[in-house]
Image (cartoon, rainbow, N blue to C red):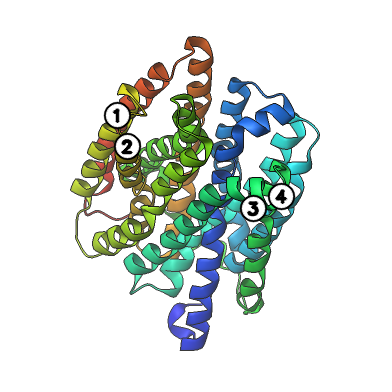
Amino acid sequence: MVAAQQNPTRTRLGALVALLLAAVNLRLAVTSVGPVLDEIRDGLGMSATVAGLLASVPVMCFAAVGLTAPRLARRFGASRVILVGLTVLAAGLAVRPFAPGTALFLLLSLVALAGIAVVNVLLPSVVKDRFPDRVGPTTGLYTVALNVGATVAAAATVPLTEHAFGNDWRLGLACWAAVAVLAVPSWLPLAREPFTRPAEVKTEDLVRVSRHPVAWALAVYFGMQSTSAYVIIGWLPQIYRDSGVSAEQAGVLFALTSFLGVPLGFALSAFAGRVRSQSWIAVGLGVFGLAGYGGLWWDPAAAPWLWAVFLGIVNTAFPLVLTLIALRGRNPATVVRLSAFAQSVGYILAIPGPFLVGALHDATGSWRAPLALVLCLIVPQMIAGWFAGRDRQV
């Protein structure tokens, strides 16, 4: 990588713009699916259990592909790998909705999500490399962009499908490929920058993050918050719809959950970067998770807006853990490895969650058992967050 202090202000601003445009794409490929899940299931003949597998596809892909990101970045440079990842994402999003069956739809989802996976892992290292003096605020900005993309896709997919595309859910999903296409040009100047491949043996590259307790705390925290996030992404609109809420209102409630991450994610990341320990922040977010999922377990339609707000607050665990990854690594090289380890192991831990939620719903015909499972998982999230937030570095 090219060190941030060697770049002129204009190049640094260009890097920030590229970072934000990439971040916009990190969730819209997933959040656009939930509001039209019923239509997708009808169109492809998909059961609730398979739909749960669809919700697990992102975490499976992020776990598997994310492990390759450090090696690819070392060989080709992070900016070039991110550029290719965005291109692959755009292609997958454009083609996926027109798959004739469930298997191909899942396969093309994997293609799109593979592009997201490498970008997911490498963006924290880009922040550490180019903005070492502004890690918290910069992470906050790119999580704002991420949540804007997630919110717009969640809120707009149903209206676009119904009013712009004649109730064709395939076009309603495919249109989001345009957002990925728009992000690609911003990475071209960064990809053209001279890249010196690091030496094969460097002291900082020999850090064995898997032996460090902080890395495991980050991985467990990442895994538990990912489980919560992908249950929300995959099932929250359906939970509301099954309780009698209209499809459009369910989409708006889901969008509210995502939208709250915009101001809260930025403020939380900026604040977390200024304090020495973030343990109490992680525990506090878990309390809101217990309240939000507890409310859904009791009655989704009783106070749907309140539950959506609580879940939006607990969802800011994602920008928190990204900030923690950047803070816990001493340098960009370590952050790449720490990011890859925490995200890959975390996503492996998160794989069963969305699938089990769908399977439990199929088996019981109710959302109470699945939501009880998620409530139980909030506890280890709070414990891991406490240890990951302590003032220690890898």
Earlier in the chain: of badge 4 and badge 3, it is 3
Earlier in the chain: of badge 1 and badge 4, it is 4
Earlier in the chain: of badge 2 and badge 4, it is 4
Q: Which amino acid type corresponds to the residue marked 2 in the rendered image? A: Trp
Q: Position of residue 272 (x, y in %)?
A: 25, 59
Mark 1: secondary structure:
helix
Q: Is residue 152 left or right of residue 325?
A: right
Q: Position of residue 354 (x, y in %)?
A: 50, 29
Q: Which residue in the structure is indicated by mark 3?
A: 115
Earlier in the chain: of badge 1 and badge 3, it is 3
Q: Nearer the viewer, mark 1 or mark 4?
A: 4
- For residue 295, the mark is 1
**Residue visible at 39% across and 46% down in the picture:** 257
- The residue nearer to you, when weighing 262 against 114, is 262
Q: Which residue in the structure is indicated by mark 2?
A: 307
Q: Is residue 173 left or right of residue 55?
A: right
Q: Which amino acid type corresponds to the residue marked 1 in the rendered image? A: Gly
**Residue visible at 40% across and 36% down in the picture:** 228
Q: Which residue in the structure is indicated by mark 4?
A: 165
